[in-house]
Image: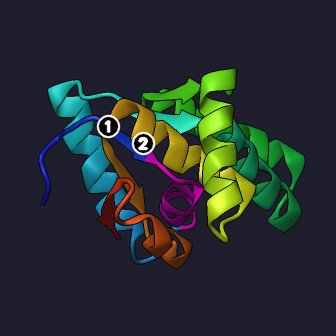
Amino acid sequence: MPAGLPRVFDSWAVIALLEAEPAGSTVSSLILLAQASEAPMWMTVVNLGEVWYRLARAYSQSEADSSVEQIRELGFEVQDADWTLTRQAAQFKSRYRLSYADCFAAALAKQRNVELVTGDPEFRQLEKEIKILWL
């Protein structure tokens, strides 16, 4: 298991955790390692919004609200989308066939020079641009 390092988490990873999908146990282990070593765990506000709308569609808005609170309680730092982050995300979007929300996760990983935790195959295009910890 990788050490407790600072990492960016994509919505794919967080949904895997919340939905108890097979990759969710690895995400849980990464969170425990980060908590034990006080390593930062980041998500962008855009990706957190993606988690929220997917849960709201599948369950309810109150369930989505509870899940977002749970994510915050785990210690995730939510990064707002300032111009520097947005411009980097837009650069990725202009060059790759990636969802705009995914571009924000990639942009934050690039900006912080840390691994992006995901299992979303769309990110394969970015393997030369950012570090990825595949689930």
Position of the C terminus, as image quadrant, is bottom left
Residue at 57 percent across and 27 percent down: it is 78
Element class at badge 2 = helix
Indicate whether residue 101 is drawn in magenta: no
Element class at badge 1 = loop
As rendered, which of 53 and 117 lies closer to the eye? 117
As rendered, which of 2 and 16 lies closer to the eye? 2
Q: Are marks 2 and 1 in contact (CB under 8 Å)?
A: yes
Name above or below for residue 99 compared with residue 38.
below
Relative to 14, is 22 on the left or the right?
left
Mark 1 Cα shell of 10 Å, populated few (<14), some (14-19), many (≥20): some
Residue type (three-letter) at the residue carrying disc 1: Asn
* Bounds of the magenta segment: 9-19
Residue at 75 percent across and 43 percent down: it is 49
Res. 67 in view? no
- Residue 13 at what x, y percent from top left? 48, 60
Residue at 70 percent across and 57 percent down: it is 94
- Residue 2 at what x, y percent from top left? 14, 55
Q: Which residue is mark 1?
A: 113
Q: Which residue is mark 2?
A: 109
